[in-house]
């Protein structure tokens, strides 16, 4: 049995950054990030996702060397501590992913799905132990929320995601190592996000595990009129819809609360 055989998977977020939209600056040092990761594992995280560059709307990319210098020491220390869960690196750069893999990471979470760094598919293929999360997005974080537009939201996102999947398969990545993410909040407005969530089953039909990143995002704020620090209830409501519609992996800041929520939800049945 592999981790992807579980009924659901909780991915805990560790931002080694100063400007992430929710917890920017809290874990900007390697020691703070390691402590955060260990806490999230204790709370029930099945995977730890470590990012060294914010992907919030309006954020600018860091030089890959600086991003790698933030991420790799955290991965290395977690491996030294003997953590038993997979470690993911959240990056669009193959050089950052390579440094993290060299330190012990076994998942690559690319919010551009190889679109920005076309070397990413080959990098993942050359490390067959690695899973690849392919997230749909357009543009870059600093431009993606400038009037996002779709004639057919779900159809276009699926077709663009399928092209990314094909690029990774053609590079030699095992189909069983690919995970798809519709990219909530990445080049989507509130209406786009809501439609994608309602029709998440269309992504499940692609034949790959579906990851959702809903945690405290701006569309939750738009629906609830709550600031980011007060969006946990709205996030859990969206999580229920995502689980019911077939999502497998939940990328979250609030691991303990999500773990309890999904434990009860699954105990009572998917159709509650």
Image (cartoon, rainbow, N blue to C red):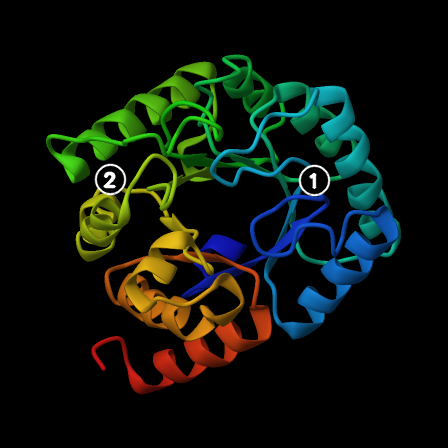
Q: Who's the residue at 34% across and 30% down the image? A: 146
Closest to the observer: 150 or 34? 150
Q: Who's the residue at 65% across and 35% down the image? A: 53
Q: Quadrant of residue 239?
A: bottom left
Which residue bears the numbered disc 2? 206
Q: Is residue 188 left or right of residue 4?
A: left
For label 1, the SS is loop
Q: Who's the residue at 48% across and 71% down the image? A: 230
Q: Quadrant of residue 236?
A: bottom left
Provide residue 197's location: percent of width, then percent of height.
25, 54
Give the alpha-carbon distance from disc 2 to disc 1, as whole Å. 26 Å
For label 2, the SS is loop
Query: In which quadrant will I find the C terminus?
Result: bottom left
- Can you say whether 243 is above or below 251 in the image? below
Closest to the observer: 259 or 219? 219
How many callouts does the rendering have? 2
- Can you say whether 15 is above or below 267 in the image? above
Provide residue 120's location: percent of width, then percent of height.
54, 20
Which residue bears the numbered disc 1? 105
Q: Quadrant of residue 164?
A: top left
Q: Is residue 200 left or right of residue 140?
A: left
Closest to the observer: 210 or 93? 93
Provide residue 226's location: percent of width, then percent of height.
41, 68
**First along the sequence among labels 2 and 1:** 1
Closest to the observer: 191 or 251? 191
Q: Is residue 179 left or right of residue 149?
A: right
Provide residue 99's location: percent of width, then percent of height.
75, 27
Q: Who's the residue at 26% across and 75% down the image? A: 270
Instruction: Rate crowding at label 2 as few (under 14), some (14 to 19) or many (20 or more) other CA atoms within 10 Å.
Output: some
Q: Say which mark, if any, is on residue 216.
A: none
């Amino acid at each position: 049995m592999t981790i992807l055989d579980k009924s659901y998977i909780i991915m805990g977020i560790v931002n080694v950054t100063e400007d992430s939209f929710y917890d920017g600056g809290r874990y900007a040092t390697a020691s703070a990030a390691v402590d955060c990761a260990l806490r999230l594992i204790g709370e029930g995280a099945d995977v730890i996702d470590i990012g060294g560059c914010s992907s919030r709307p309006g954020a600018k990319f860091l030089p890959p060397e600086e991003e790698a210098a933030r991420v790799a020491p955290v991965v290395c220390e977690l491996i030294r501590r003997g953590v038993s869960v997979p470690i993911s690196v959240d990056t669009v750069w193959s050089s950052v992913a390579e440094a993290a893999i060299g330190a012990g990471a076994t998942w690559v979470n690319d919010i551009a799905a190889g679109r920005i760094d076309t070397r990413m598919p080959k990098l993942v293929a050359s490390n067959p132990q690695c899973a690849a999360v392919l997230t749909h997005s357009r543009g870059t974080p600093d431009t993606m929320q400038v009037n996002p537009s779709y004639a057919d939201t779900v159809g276009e996102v699926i077709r663009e995601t399928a092209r990314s999947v094909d690029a990774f398969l053609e590079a030699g990545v095992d189909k069983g190592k690919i995970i798809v993410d519709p990219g909530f909040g990445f080049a989507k407005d509130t209406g786009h996000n809501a439609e994608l969530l309602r029709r998440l089953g269309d992504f499940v039909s692609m034949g790959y595990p579906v990851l959702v990143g809903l945690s405290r995002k701006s569309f939750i704020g738009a629906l609830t009129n709550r600031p980011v620090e007060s969006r946990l209830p709205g996030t859990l409501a969206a999580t229920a819809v995502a689980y019911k519609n077939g999502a497998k992996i939940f990328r979250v800041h609030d691991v303990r609360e999500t773990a309890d929520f999904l434990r009860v939800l699954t105990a009572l049945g998917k159709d509650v």
